[in-house]
Image: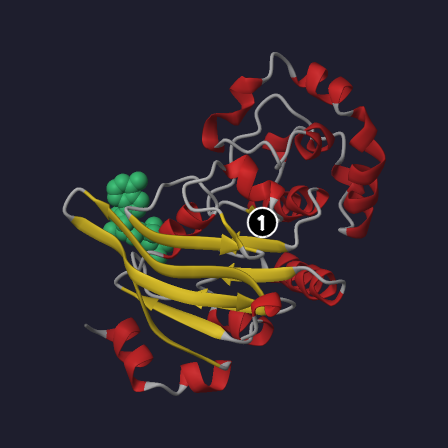
């Protein structure tokens, strides 16, 4: 891949937790304009890689580049300023906020699970970020969830929450968006809606790196697909290549 076409480069990344090696010399690239899949068995290190890329964890060694800029060890907001935004496998708690307010607090300022504490009150959030109100409304409409705008964010179903999470991420207008299991626990109707939105946003220019356990979902959307096993890249290929590879079958079934 030529340099301009690489929107994200993960180079020889390493991360251990105590004696456990979660990321083991992981190396791969994400080409601009793609929906790149990231799959692997439970515990393979997929979410850890997202945390390393997006600045939530600091790698022990290795390098992360976004749009050609070294962002290794940078803070999440700095990585976001370079055009990379991520969602969480478990959406963060949005207590005391309506969906509209939740849209307005994120996710350029996303310091993880405790981010709500940064603000004195949801009311202040809405006021200080009122210039984004029109954008938030437009995106909620595009996602066909504008009818939820005034509902408490805690009242949403798991699937609606995932859609709101994606909508919030889009408000930051990222060049590259990392989705961590966007359809886990989501019903088929909302799953299709999410797939449609990802496809539409991709056609409009957003690059995606997509972790997903639902093989049908990921194989229909993503190309190429990167396979992670025990913290390392096992292989990369088209959905067909990946699905017919013995090593992949073995990583999922046994090993
Ligand atoms: P995946 O998302 O592929 O299921 P994870 O990246 O969540 O895998 O986890 C990979 C390994 O790293 C697991 O063994 C997990 O328990 C461990 N791990 C992840 N985050 C932490 C952490 N903050 N502290 C300790 N161990 C962790
Ligand atoms: Mg995970």
Please state if 60 lies on the left or on the right of 109 as rendered.
left
- State the image quarter where residue 44 is shown: bottom left
At a point 33% along the width and 46% down the height, the residue shown is 59
Name the spot of residue 22 as percent of width and height, x first. 26, 53
Name the spot of residue 120 as percent of width and height, x first. 60, 12
Name the spot of residue 193 as percent of width and height, x first. 69, 60
Front residue (pair 217, 49) = 49
At a point 79% along the width and 32% down the height, the residue shown is 132
Residue 129 vertical position relative to residue 189 in the rendered view, above or below: above
Please state if 11 lies on the left or on the right of 191 as rendered.
left
The answer as to whether callout 1 falls within 8 Å of ligand 1 is no
Residue 26 vertical position relative to residue 174 in the rendered view, above or below: below
Name the spot of residue 254 as percent of width and height, x first. 21, 74
Quadrant showing the C terminus = bottom left
Residue 120 vertical position relative to residue 62 in the rendered view, above or below: above
At a point 74% along the width and 67% down the height, the residue shown is 203
- State the image quarter where residue 95 is shown: top right
Residue bearing mark 1: 84
């Amino acid at each position: 891949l030529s340099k301009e076409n690489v929107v994200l480069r993960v180079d020889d990344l390493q991360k251990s937790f105590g004696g456990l090696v979660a990321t083991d010399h992981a190396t791969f690239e994400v080409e601009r304009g793609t929906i790149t899949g990231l799959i692997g068995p439970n515990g393979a290190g997929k979410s850890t890689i997202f945390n390393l890329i997006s600045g939530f964890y600091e790698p022990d060694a290795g390098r992360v580049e976004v749009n050609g800029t070294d962002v290794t060890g940078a803070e999440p907001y700095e990585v976001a300023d370079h055009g990379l935004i991520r969602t969480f496998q478990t959406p963060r708690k949005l207590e005391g906020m309506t969906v509209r307010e939740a849209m307005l607090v994120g996710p350029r300022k996303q310091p993880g699970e405790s981010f709500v504490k940064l603000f004195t009150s949801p009311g202040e959030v809405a006021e200080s970020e009122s210039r984004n109100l029109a954008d938030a409304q437009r995106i909620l409409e595009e996602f066909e969830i504008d009818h939820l705008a005034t509902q408490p964010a805690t009242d949403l179903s798991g699937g609606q929450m995932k859609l709101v999470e994606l909508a919030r991420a889009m408000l930051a207008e990222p060049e590259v968006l990392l989705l961590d299991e966007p359809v886990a626990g989501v019903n088929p109707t909302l799953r299709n809606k999410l797939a449609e939105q990802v496809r539409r946003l991709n056609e409009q220019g957003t690059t995606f790196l997509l972790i997903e356990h639902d093989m049908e979902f990921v194989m229909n959307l993503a190309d190429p697909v990167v396979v992670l096993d025990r913290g390392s890249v096992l292989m990369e290929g088209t959905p067909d290549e990946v699905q017919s590879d013995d090593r992949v079958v073995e990583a999922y079934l046994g090993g």
